[in-house]
Image (tube, rainbow, N blue to C red):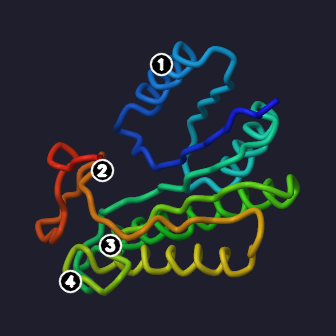
């Protein structure tokens, strides 16, 4: 009997935005379309390290071990370096890199114990080169994230295996406040490959 894939997607939802409403709606839609599958939704702050580990341990139990996990934490709150907004740059770096590192640690702990799994790490086209102004810290943190995923992939030659998401740029929720966003179409203008 073939086992149904179990995928977990993680992202960052600011406290001011509704947390799991859309995920709960997607859960209901999936359960209606595919009776018998397991779908588990957890709300967590990806910057709370213990909460990340606790959520992964609970999800591992709920789902009898996930097959695939997508790390998609991102924050585009950066400000130009040296303009007095170190707090915004630090928050961006912590969410985009440190929080993703914590998620990868918790995920790979699970995958190593299972002896299998597929880690998908979503980075950004911004990882390919340094960008100015509000995007400087964002681009640097995404470059670090891409290097982290490549390092995990180099170590895990057979299984579990990570897939760094190919660089792309798409304005997703929450919207960026950056004025300079080259190569960034909105999700409403993007089209799915067909």
Q: Of the residues tagged 3 and 2, which is closer to the observer?
A: 2
Query: Residue 116, how many percent across, how many down?
Result: 79, 56
The Cα atoms of the two marked residues, 2 and 1, are separated by 23 Å
Assess whether mark 3 and mark 1 are in contact (beta carbons under 8 angstroms). Answer: no
First-in-chain label (3 vs 2): 3
Q: Secondary structure at mark 1?
A: helix
Q: Disc 1 and disc 3: Cα gap in Å?
A: 31 Å
Q: Residues within 10 Å of mark 1 (few under 14, many from 20)?
A: few
Return the residue at label 1: 29
Q: Earlier in the sequence, mark 4 or mark 2?
A: 4
At label 4, counting other C-alpha atoms closer than 10 Å, the crowd grade (few under 14, some 14-19, many 20 or more) is some
Residue 93's place in the image compared with 74, above or below, is below
As measured in the structure, the alpha-carbon distance from the residue carrying label 3 to the one carrying label 2 is: 18 Å
* Tag shown at residue 193: 2
Q: Which residue is mark 4?
A: 132
Using the image, tell me which numbered label, if any, was put on residue 125: 3
Q: Nearer the viewer, residue 26 or 103?
A: 26
Q: Mark 2, mark 1: which one is toward the viewer?
A: 2
Say which residue appears at 56% left-offset and 52% top-offset: 70
């Amino acid at each position: 009997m073939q086992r149904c894939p179990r995928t977990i997607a993680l992202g960052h939802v600011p406290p001011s935005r509704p947390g799991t409403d859309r995920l709960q709606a997607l859960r209901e839609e999936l359960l209606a379309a595919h009776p018998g599958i397991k779908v588990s939704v957890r709300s967590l702050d990806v910057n709370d390290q213990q909460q990340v580990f606790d959520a992964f341990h609970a999800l591992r139990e709920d789902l009898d071990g996930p097959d695939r996990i997508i790390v998609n934490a991102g924050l585009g709150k950066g400000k130009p370096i040296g303009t007095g907004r170190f707090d915004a740059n630090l928050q961006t770096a912590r969410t985009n890199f440190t929080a993703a590192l914590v998620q990868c640690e918790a995920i790979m702990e699970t995958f190593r114990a299972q002896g299998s799994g597929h880690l998908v790490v979503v980075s950004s086209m911004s990882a390919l080169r340094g960008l100015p102004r509000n995007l400087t810290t964002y681009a640097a943190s995404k470059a670090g994230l891409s290097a982290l995923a490549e390092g995990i992939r180099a170590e895990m030659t057979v299984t579990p295996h990570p897939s760094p998401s190919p660089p792309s740029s798409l304005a997703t929720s929450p919207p960026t406040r950056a004025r300079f966003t080259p190569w960034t179409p909105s999700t409403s203008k993007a089209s799915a490959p067909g």
